[in-house]
Amino acid sequence: MLKEIFEIESSAFFESLTCTFGAKVEAMEFKFDELYAKELDSKDPLAKFRDEFLFPQFNDEKVVYFTGNSLGLQPKAAKAALNQELDDWAKYGVEGHFEAKQPWFAYHEMFAEPLANLVGAKPNEVVAMNGLTTNLHLLMVSFYQPKGSKTKILCEAKAFPSDLYALKSQIRFHGLDPEEHLIGLVPREGESHLRTEDILAKVEEHANELALVMLGGVNYYSGQVLAMQEIAALCQNRGITVGYDLAHGIGNVNLELHDWGVDFASWCSYKYLNSGPGSVSGVYIHERHHHKDDIPRFEGWWGHDKTERFKMESDFKPIRSAEAWQLSNAPVLAMAVHKASLDLFMEAGFDNLIEKSKKMTAYLNFVIDEVSSQSTTTSFEIITPKERGCQLSILCHGAGRELFDKLSSNGVVADWREPNVIRIAPVPMYNSYEDCYRFGKILADSLTQ
Ligand SMILES: *Cc1c(COP(=O)(O)O)cnc(C)c1O
């Protein structure tokens, strides 16, 4: 009896220790060892989802696929989902709008729940539509309104190029000069990511001139997760509209857009959401904007009141939800795959995925540090800060493109950015701890070959 109580108490004690010291305790226990990695996989409750995806092959084995931050892998369910719509099209023709298994007329409505779940919004605040850059433009039509002294936009100086093109052309669209009206955030000398205090200070400094703060919630290059909640809170306090590009955020990190008071956001579905090349984007618009009659918006029939859409009247009557921003009827073929993929997220549970992501990324970080400490010629510096999702950006000291090429020719799919950064993302949905071990092994071998 006594012994039992002691055992219960000591295990509870150990659990509280792991909770309090989380990653630290685990990091101390990590081993760069194949059997150890396989053991972590055998204990992983999400391990079975790896089998739901199709991997490119290398020597009759799965490649080490670490580019889910660029293009997520194909879910096996994608083909059947797509075929369902092709079959319904063959069978029903135009009647598929109402007769298909999932009638096309209301097809996009299936995404409200799962997308709301992933971005922390109400279902009426999200809608799947268009492409990401297209959506950024549509959203800026509504949310970038230069007036009086408030005419400027704050962004990251090294934002993703497409975002910069969108921002600059929006500024020019209002007859203004991007040189003067676009303020870029730059890391401090010698640092590779932005400090939250510096972002907040910049917002304060320009509070009276800013019409919009528009940032990548998770930076595509460094993998840094910005302090989205704090930034949004300050912007709201200063009467500045705030929007996030979540191309690298959705499906990767925890988001609470509604509670944070973020005005708008957009993302793509082909990176962490595994919905296929160029698949449909999505937007979030806070509900406080849904009932404004004076909000500028480019309009189309799919944003019109559903009960009257087919009356074909000439005056636009907006749906009082994010759907008002839709222009066209839904791209059903792309959306079929999107749905099949989101079903897997709902099945796995996003909280579970995040938990695995933290542990697996910590393990991969540990493996890279091990390889780095064992090498006499090369050292690896992870420039991704601790505020991160699953991406790690590795700055290679003493190695360059030839190292990356060796990795590629040995079955690793990673991403190279000049001058010498390797970006890798162990995706919790389908990557394994063994992938992390294999990466470390190939990396170490590449240094000695
Ligand atoms: C991937 C990515 C894009 C891509 O834009 P598309 O319109 O989907 O081609 C844009 N912005 C960011 C930050 C990205 O990471």
Image (cartoon, rainbow, N blue to C red):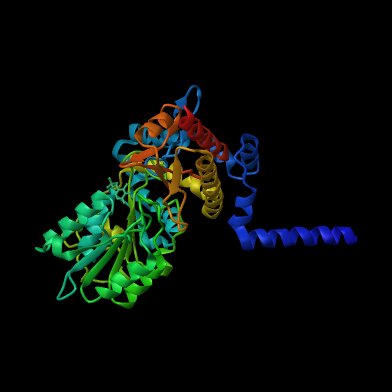
Residue ID at (53%, 33%): 441
Front one among 267 and 29 = 29
Report x, y in % for residue 168. 17, 57
Q: Is 408 located above or below residue 186 in the figure?
A: above
| Image quadrant in which the N terminus is located | bottom right
Dividing the picture into quadrants, the one containing residue 10 is: bottom right
Dividing the picture into quadrants, the one containing residue 295 is: bottom left
Residue ID at (26%, 56%): 136
Q: Is residue 84 left or right of residue 38?
A: left
Front one among 350 and 304 = 350
Report x, y in % for residue 276. 37, 39
Q: Is residue 112 visible?
A: yes
Q: Is residue 30 left or right of residue 95?
A: right
Q: Is residue 62 left or right of residue 190?
A: right
Report x, y in % for residue 51. 54, 35
Q: Is residue 55 visible?
A: no
Report x, y in % for residue 366. 55, 46
